Image (cartoon, rainbow, N blue to C red):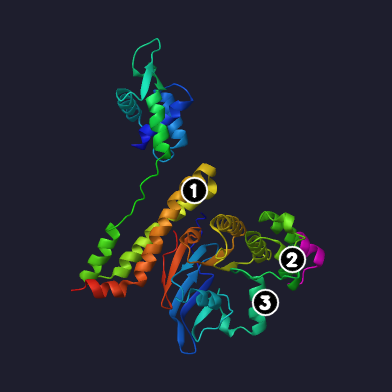
Amino acid sequence: MTTTVGRGTPLLTADDVHLSFGETTALRGASLHVYAGEVLALMGPSGSGKSTLLHCLAGILTPGSGSIRYGDRDLARMSDTERSTLRRGAFGFVFQFGQLVPELTCLENVALPLRLAGAGRREAQRRAATWLDRLEVADLAGKRPGQVSGGQGQRVAVARALVTEPAVIFADEPTGALDSLNGELVMKLFIAAARDTGAAVVLVTHEPRVAAYSDREAVVRDGRVREQEPAR
Amino acid sequence: MSVGFALLGLLENGPRHGYDLKRSYDEAFGRDRALHYGQVYSTMARLLKNGLVEVESEPGDGPERKKYAITHAGMTDVAEWISRPEKPEPYLQSTLYTKVVLALMTGRDATEVLDAQRAEHLRLMRVLTRRKTDGDLADELICDHALFHLEADLRWLELTAARLDRLAARVRP
């Protein structure tokens, strides 16, 4: 484990975040810090607000009150364009399933974030191929998502999240749809690759064995966070 | 108990000296807890007394020169032991349950008890996960066995946390 984890200024900060959906209160004063290069597991029972918090941290949802800061910038004060740029460049996403574009090949899927960021087709595909190889799914380059297994698809999704070398990767139940063996393989490759690039990972999971890949955990309960001290 | 059977089983591939047996055992099963020589020799003495091994004499004196061979009775015992399912550990009335109930009965914060335990379990799970990630297949299997058990405990912790109010209503005076 790197010794710099958990030290210094947080990369992402949630400060006293409240958010309601109609009558339902999802977050009631959630505060959390994410440090550069750390793998942080967000745990808690279903409906505790952990996914909502992840979406707030990633700038997908805007808190009703309280703030989310990336470095010293308040996400709520950014324009939509600035937030989109941040999400495409500095953030990467891995979801439980359904995130790959079915019409594109696996290689094109991984190349997509680079293309959106303005990279040329050839360069984007070259880098995408490197990432497929790193996630041990190079042989799937020409296949479409519908032609690969769940575990393979998740590895392609991880490659796509990492291809832009983001500062933070948000992963919401990344192994939720996989059996133990495939889940383990995805986590092993995912976390090793994230650590290599120095990306921080915010990992929402209800599976303790998945959380065990993290450096520390934060437990979300009733819309509030009980955060473990960062590793020293 | 299983040390005796493991040593006996190791003899099925041919007679061995005590130190050779210890080395094989440590390599295959003793990653976390290597055997002491004394333990090997006392176990072999017991197996010898029960007729499960016999000694093939070699020139020279002292226990370290003894070469042990498994007997027919020994082989039968190993076969029987391997094929007999282990008794599942029910873990009923665990210490943790007692602590949670006592915390509730005495007006302490039972959530804190559960959270502290969760953190401790996850800490160990991280150590095992790291070891498994860096290790070979044997490490992976040994660690996975422990990880699945710890995970089961953690699920119980979570479920109990969600039922604390109901439990409190039952146990509080």
Res B131 label:
1
Asked whether B159 or A29 is in front, the reply is B159
Q: Residue at left 37%, top 23%? A: B53
> For residue A70, what is the image quadrant?
bottom right
Is residue B53 toward the left or the right of residue A114 in the image?
Answer: left
Q: Nearer the viewer, mark 2 or mark 3?
A: 2
Q: Is residue A148 above or below residue B75?
A: below
Task: Give x and y (percent) for residue A166.
Answer: 63, 67
Residue A40 part of the magenta-drawn span: no
Q: Nearer the viewer, mark 3 or mark 1?
A: 1
Magenta-highlighted residues: A117-126
Distance of mark 2 from mark 3, alpha carbons?
Answer: 17 Å
Amino acid under disc 2:
Ala
> SS for tag 3?
helix
Asked whether A67 or B2 is in front, the reply is B2
Chain letter, disc 3 residue: A
Residue A125 part of the magenta-drawn span: yes
* Residue topped by disc 2: A111
> SS for tag 1?
helix
Asked whether B47 or A133 is in front, the reply is B47
* Residue topped by disc 3: A85
Amino acid under disc 3:
Thr
Task: Give x and y (percent) for residue B123.
Answer: 41, 57
Task: Give x and y (percent) for residue B31.
Answer: 44, 39
Earlier along the polypeptide chain: callout 2 or callout 3? 3
Amino acid under disc 1:
Arg
Res B65 label:
none
Chain letter, disc 2 residue: A
> SS for tag 2?
helix
Q: Main secondary structure of the magenta part?
A: helix
